[in-house]
Amino acid sequence: MEVSFHEEIKLLQLGNGEEFHGEGILAITKALLQSGVSYIGGYQGAPVSHLLDVMVQAKEYVSTLGVHVEACSNEASAAAMLGASIHYPMRGAVTWKSIVGTNVAADALSNLSSAGVVGGVLIVVGEDYGEGASVIQERTHAYAMKSSMILVDPRPNLSQMVNMVEHAFALSECSNMPAMMELRIRACHVKGQFEAKNNISPSISSTHLLNEPAHFSYEKLAHPPVTFVQEKLKFQSRIPAAQKYIVEHELNELFDGEHKNLGLIVQGGLYNTLIRSLGEFGLADSFGNSKIPILVLNVAYPLVPNQIETFCKTKDAVVIIEEGQPEYIEQEISLSLRRANISTPIHGKDIFQNAGEYNADIMIKGLLTFISEYLPSEYATHISQVREHITDLESRKKSVAAKLQDQSVSLPPRPPGFCIGCPERPVFSAIKLAQKTVGDVHISADIGCHAFGTFPPFSSGHTILGYGMSLASRAGVSPNMQRRVLSIMGDGGFWHNGLLTGVQSALFNADDAVLLIFKNGYTSATGTQDILSTPSSGEKKNAIDKLKSLVHTNQSIEKTLKGLGVQWLKTVNTYEVDHVRDTLIEAFTSSFNGLKVIIAEGECQLERQRRIKPWLSSLLKAGKRVLRVKYGVDADVCNGDHACIRLSGCPTLTLKDNPDPLKLDPVASVIEGCVGCGLCGENAHAATLCPSFYRTEIIQNPTYSEKFINLIQTPLLRLLQTH
């Protein structure tokens, strides 16, 4: 059973005049269908996973419109889909997480942007930037500038976001430039409503096929010498055409205010935070009415110099509110004003922090400096109150920091970790145990759920250089190290990039390497989407009552590796810690000189729970017998050294007070939430820890024979306990 988007799919089918209520990213998804797209593709990643996840499950509906939907193997293949719009008047959209996804897609994007498009192209990127980000702190803006792509940054309001999707396609078509739309996490999850329109069946689609291919045109290829002409087209015709459209359709919004001598220029995505921050000074109300004029850049690239100059030339000062570094917008505006001999003072990174997400606290601090200088008397009370609030907040932060330095009240570290029962946790336990035998090993880590292994208690992984890049990233280390290097990769990373950049390269160069592939059946880190090696529905159903994993089901990874020429290949059950440990030791010490691959197979526990919980509920409702396994710790046997916790890190394995009044050390305890994966017991056995773990079988709706046995056993056990 997978996550269902049944309700979301119904929202996609709303027609003219109906009210859409939902999240921003789903509104964008609906807007794509209203814009008449012919094809949609992409690769999942926060915060835009919802778009493709919903579309994949809505295939049955969108196929009636003639829209083709494809879950791509990586962002490069998604970007390459957009090549359909170079020759044909077909609108296409793809999505991925930026900046990492845009890095992967950069080659295709450069070629696409050089050739130019006839059909409208929109790339919806999740701008995962700032304090809550899970990727490198870089911005998409640089790609738009270097490749001459339109960059749309819509104000987080559902009506405006939907409107900008439709304009982005038209803007792309009139300028022949691909358009990117950057959506921050707040924009993706902002709630609201808008008046829906009918979805449009595209004129060229899977139900309205092209009769003939386009005539060959060398000018459409991003290949010298025509690339020199394409470079001129970018600046002589494409960007001017885009700028003209932006002005004619008023895509950048101007909100007037009573303090006309001042101005604020802000990226569209930061507008809501700006209004909220201005409200602290009494300069904006809850309806978004500002007393300082605001120019909202819903199109962050290209800028329109005349529009900027007109806004700035009558002002005593203007603040440019731009998140992150380098300050692309501020530099471009400053240069534009200098060329126009406009001397309006420009503020930006001189009063706002240089890097990081512009949340309300950061925004308020920057505005405080600006307002204190230019509106000191009118808003003196608000300025004083904000200063007091900031001082109080800083004081409390220092107080908390001081307390944390006091060991007597220190909080335990709580780094991100694996899910309860995750099949990847036992493998990291096995890695720790294997290193006790072979010595410390250099570990090339990778992107995916297994990246949690870099946190305590495992702390395993020296580098993470890209999705599926672990085997490639050890290539410079292993020839220069006495001990073999371990590379860790997920099955999602294997299909995304690792097969070619890692495995093929290692085989071609006859490298002596050890590769560990986690085969949990899904690209779990992006939302447990299906991949080529996902078990079939039949395999999942047949294995529904198995305790631990789906072992030896879909064999596509094994067959692929054998087909490439991998000679040393072993598949292990992730939960069998001693077997995994022994296999790792064998790989590190084997006389075989070449690529050694260990496939650690165990189904993603989230997917397993999603499947078995409804099944178990149905059995209970039907009055049928259900057996559930839980593990526990005998407090009388536990010696309190907590080696089990250091080796496992399971969230359900914790501490409690020792029941023995003569012992001070707390004992280990298994709390509610245990899914019965058995890792704690496996670790105790593999590491020869204390025998304090026990396995309990909880039976619901027992049989008559089980009830009879229980009637005999219960009083007997009580009798034995009294002696």
Image (cartoon, rainbow, N blue to C red):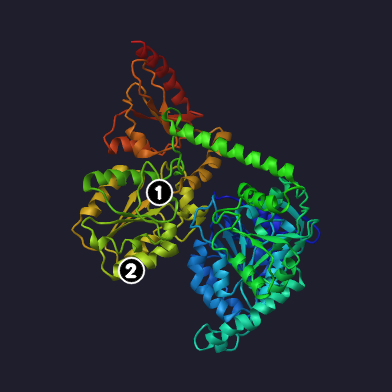
Q: Secondary structure at mark 2?
A: helix
- Residue 505: image tag: 2
Image vertical order of residue 291 relative to residue 168, above or below? above
Using the rendered view, name the quadrant where residue 129 is placed.
Answer: bottom right
Query: Which label sits in the foreground, 1 or 2?
Result: 2
The residue under label 1 is 602
Question: Seen in the image, is 346 located left or right of residue 658?
Answer: right
Asked whether 44 or 334 is in front, the reply is: 334
Neighbour class for label 2 at 10 Å: few (<14), some, many (≥20)? some
Image vertical order of residue 467 relative to residue 424, above or below? below
Quadrant showing the C terminus: top left
The structure residue drawn at horizontal position 31% and vertical position 25%, both measured from the top left corner, is 639
Q: Which tag, 1 or 2, sits closer to the chain's start? A: 2
Question: Seen in the image, is 2 located left or right of residue 253?
Answer: left
Asked whether 518 or 656 is in front, the reply is: 656
Image vertical order of residue 83 relative to residue 529, above or below? below
Residue type beneath disc 1: Gly
Residue type beneath disc 2: Ser
Q: Secondary structure at mark 1?
A: loop
Res 174 visible: no
The structure residue drawn at horizontal position 41% and vertical position 38%, both measured from the top left corner, is 650
Position of residue 368 measured from the top left corner of the image (x, y, whole percent): 66, 49
